Amino acid sequence: MMIRRLWPSIAWALIILVLMGVPGTYFPSVKSFWDWLSPDKAVHLVVFGVQSILLLHAFREQYFQKKKRLIYQSSILLISILFALSTEVLQKYLFVGRDGNVWDFIADVVGVFIGFLAYYLLNYKKMKAKNRIQ
């Protein structure tokens, strides 16, 4: 029944792909490092933060098991970063009117880590209780 827990993450990934495929003329462009803090980057942070939270939530049973936690965290982190990279590559080479950007990729990765931190902080008490039982 893993697919039942994964469907929100899969649906969110499809939403991300649609958003990343919208022509770039609808969004502001980033010219310099100081523009990095633009609303566009905040969207990247939130979108990929939510994606990592959904993936962590799908694997919550494994996440709460102390012995398997590092394996699942690493796998989810790698999947999330590769997905972020693939969206930027798709923007650069496939999506019309879009341009892959290293600053967008950095914002995506920071969003993934923020999602990990948020998930950890939201579930700290549950993890602590589960680890006492095992």
Image (cartoon, rainbow, N blue to C red):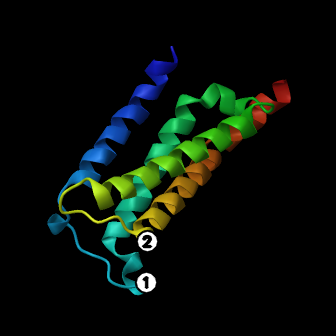
Q: Quadrant of residue 61?
A: top right
On the picture, is 120 further left or further right than 109? right
Q: Residue 28's spot in the image, x, y percent? A: 23, 73
- For label 2, the crowd category at 10 Å Cα-Cα, with few meaning under 14, some 14 to 19 and many 20 or more, is some
103 over 22 or under it: above or below: below
At label 1, which amino acid type do we have?
A: Phe
At label 2, which amino acid type do we have?
A: Trp
Q: Residue 98's spot in the image, x, y percent? A: 24, 62
Question: 121 or 74: which is nearer to us?
Answer: 74
Q: Secondary structure at mark 2?
A: helix
On the picture, is 17 further left or further right than 46? left
Q: Residue at x 42, y 51 (%)?
A: 86
Q: Quadrant of residue 8?
A: top left
Q: Residue at x 30, y 57 (%)?
A: 93
67 over 25 or under it: above or below: above
Q: Residue 33's spot in the image, x, y percent? A: 43, 84
Q: Which residue is mark 2?
A: 103
Extreme top residue here?
A: 1
Q: Secondary structure at mark 1?
A: helix
* Total numbered labels placed on residues in the image: 2
Q: Which residue is mark 1?
A: 33
Q: Are marks 1 and 2 in contact (CB under 8 Å)?
A: yes
Q: Residue at x 41, y 86 (%)?
A: 34
On the picture, is 60 further left or further right than 105? right
Q: Residue 81's spot in the image, x, y percent? A: 53, 51
- For label 1, the crowd category at 10 Å Cα-Cα, with few meaning under 14, some 14 to 19 and many 20 or more, is few
